[in-house]
Image (cartoon, rainbow, N blue to C red):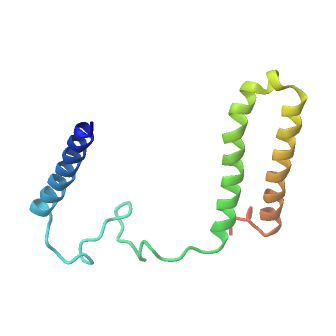
Amino acid sequence: MFDGIITMAAIALAGVGSIYLLHGITAINADPLAVLPFQSGWQPEQHALSRYHVRWYLATLLFLAFDVEMLFMYPWAVVVAELGATAIIEMFLFLGALFVGVVWAWREGGLRWV
């Protein structure tokens, strides 16, 4: 009963182990700080895990508001004819909640680029 599961787990572990082995054989043993990736041909000026400025959180909020809106509007558009007025009312309530977030981000300066 468990033969297929055990076989699949063994194949997965062998695959992962072979990838680690291949990496160990082909990797360059250099100083990791000296072998940094390039950003469009330029050396990075700061660490990849450095903090972002707080204004980008507002831009992220706006992106998520519009992204979540589209995520729910596509399936809604398929069933709106079947559900009728209740679907339209629910969508306007949902858009109203998203609009509150957009107005808040606008008031906080999320739409200013500088």
Outermost residue toward the front?
Answer: 1
Q: How many marks?
A: 0
Residue sitting at the far left? 25
Rendered view: 11 above or below 20: above
* Quarter of the figure with residue 72: top right
- Give whichever of 9, 52 is nearer the camera: 9
Residue drawn at (24%, 47%), measured in percent from left and top?
A: 9
87 versus 31 height, above or below: above
Q: Nearer the viewer, residue 40 or 107?
A: 107
Quadrant housing residue 89: top right
Residue 91: x percent and y percent?
Answer: 82, 39
Single out the residue that lies furthest toward the top: 82
Q: Residue at x 24, y 72 (%)?
A: 35
Q: Residue at x 31, y 66 (%)?
A: 37
Q: For the point 24% across and 37% down, which residue is it?
A: 4
Q: Is residue 22 above or below residue 81?
A: below
Q: Position of residue 40 (x, y in %)?
A: 38, 60
Q: Position of residue 77 (x, y in %)?
A: 74, 28
Horizontal side of 67 relative to 80 (left or right) equals: left
* Relative depth, front residue between 73 and 107: 73
Residue 104: x and y in percent read 82, 64
Q: Quadrant of residue 105?
A: bottom right
Q: Quadrant of the C terminus?
A: bottom right
- Quarter holding the N terminus is top left
